[in-house]
Amino acid sequence: MTVFILVSGMFTGPHVWADATARLTAAGAEVHAVSLAGLGGTRPPAGTGIDLETHIADVLAVIDSVGQVAGREIVLVGHDYGIHPVVGAADRRAGSVARIVYLDSGLPRDGVPALAAVADQGLREEALRAAGERAQGADAELPPPARDAWQLWGSTADVSDAALDRLTALASPQPLDTLLQPLRLTGAAATVPMAGILCSGNGGSIAMVQARVDLGEPTLQALTDPRVTFFELPTGHWPMLSSPTALAVTLLQAAAGEGRRLTPVAATRVQPFLLEVPELPRERTGNIDLYLPPAAHGPRPALVFVHGGPVPREARPTPRDWPVLKGYARFAAGHGVAGVTLDHRLHAVTDYEQAAADLADAVERVRADPRVDADRVALWFFSGSGPLTADWMGRTPPWLRCLAASYPIMAPLPNWGRLGSRFHPADAVAHAGSLPLVLVRAGLEAASVAATVEEFLSAAHEYGADIEVVDVPNGHHNFETVDRTGESGEAVRRAMRTVLRHLTA
């Protein structure tokens, strides 16, 4: 028999698991939904300190009550914040736990508090303010969200009005020290097989995790272990409320060791550019690489390629050494314009202001090069750099002849939290005027990303923007490396022809 121990996230308690529990029990599993101190209606006496260690002890108590019985396998399931006490408990009872399931959660690390996993910078700052204002000897708490603010903590897609009402009515303040106390791990939890369940309506996908693994992010390389499997659910951050039957089925599959496995980075080396391009040399200055046309005479227009992200700070090679970006730059140089790549510091979703400053500085240095025509520059954005396009549409300089974007993320994904209003392309496109826009759209894009593209296109059409869409019907995100087909190659050629036409006119 499988014994599921379910641990809910911030502000919530065992009640959120009711429907999923019923389905798991009907399938023959034993289920225990953990009541964490201070949450789900449990209110300890005033002055009782509640921190992460308290919640780890709550999970340990349930593990120990189940005991080790032949034929029974304990599966710990942590949703959202709940993964922190789950991993902490598994670290101390690794021999008793058969599997850990990460349900639309982050990856807890030794010495890092749970607050670090909250994507929204404003919410983190709110928690830190509450900590700073706590009265002497008082238990500081973070108040639960209002009904219309739950989406700041994760997408409420597919959650019924009644379920959202109940979630709000039963929510509890989160003891602040549960978020601020660093998690302490010995490494024993890393020996326990794991499964990740990603909710695509909240912005997660297996493809995105694989892409981060391919970038060489050190903390994710363990996810390629064959004992690690992944699943996707097409719903928001609260699958126990929105899709309890699908969640129960997935949990049973995860417990059985089923699911998709990631490919080790050594086996997914970045492919060379999908088109034949001239092997032109590059000039490296600071964070910029410049590819000049062969036998160029006089200043040439410049096409700057802006990588996506976030890209881990430790990732090697850095983006300007990725074959796909080098290929684009050489492709442009082969057609008579200066191709430019750069590294900018978009290492987390909180880094857009820094990345924007890096890009603006790089563009000005490119324009200052005497071999570049400072009055004819185009920008081409990829993937997660999409929000950076807003700067250039909102204040279009006269020398910007075209702005292109390939499979862009054009609004913050639900699991990113809030971005400043500066980085909302759907708002900025109202001011694009006659600036030519080119958008390369992947037909098999992740639903959460595709929604941001459609929002942007709707706004672009409403405001009469000069936009051309290049569709890749059978293309995925990063189609140049994922889908090396004739269709992909033709899409790159068509987009490049269009950009060059505007740039050289």
Image (cartoon, helix red, strand yellow):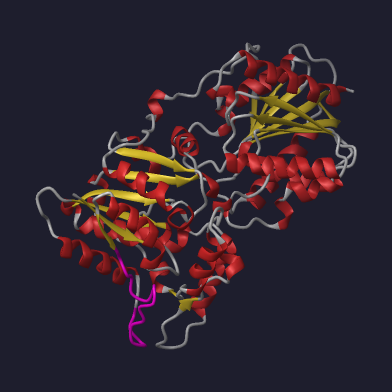
For residue 377, say whether it is visible: yes
Q: Position of residue 216 (x, y in %)?
A: 44, 35
Tell me: residue 39, above or below residue 419: below
Tell me: residue 231, above or below residue 85: above
Q: In which quadrant will I find the C terminus?
A: top right
Name the image quarter holding residue 86: bottom left
Magenta extent: 33-49
> Which secondary structure dominates the residues rendered in magenta?
loop
For residue 371, say whether it is visible: no
Tell me: residue 481, above or below residue 83: above
Tell me: residue 326, above or below residue 222: above
Q: Is residue 346 left or right of residue 305?
A: left
Q: Is residue 236 left or right of residue 91?
A: right
Q: Position of residue 319 (x, y in %)?
A: 57, 33
47 magenta-colored: yes
Q: Residue at x 30, y 61 (%)?
A: 184
Task: Say which of 162 and 190 sits in front.
Answer: 162
Q: How many marks?
A: 0
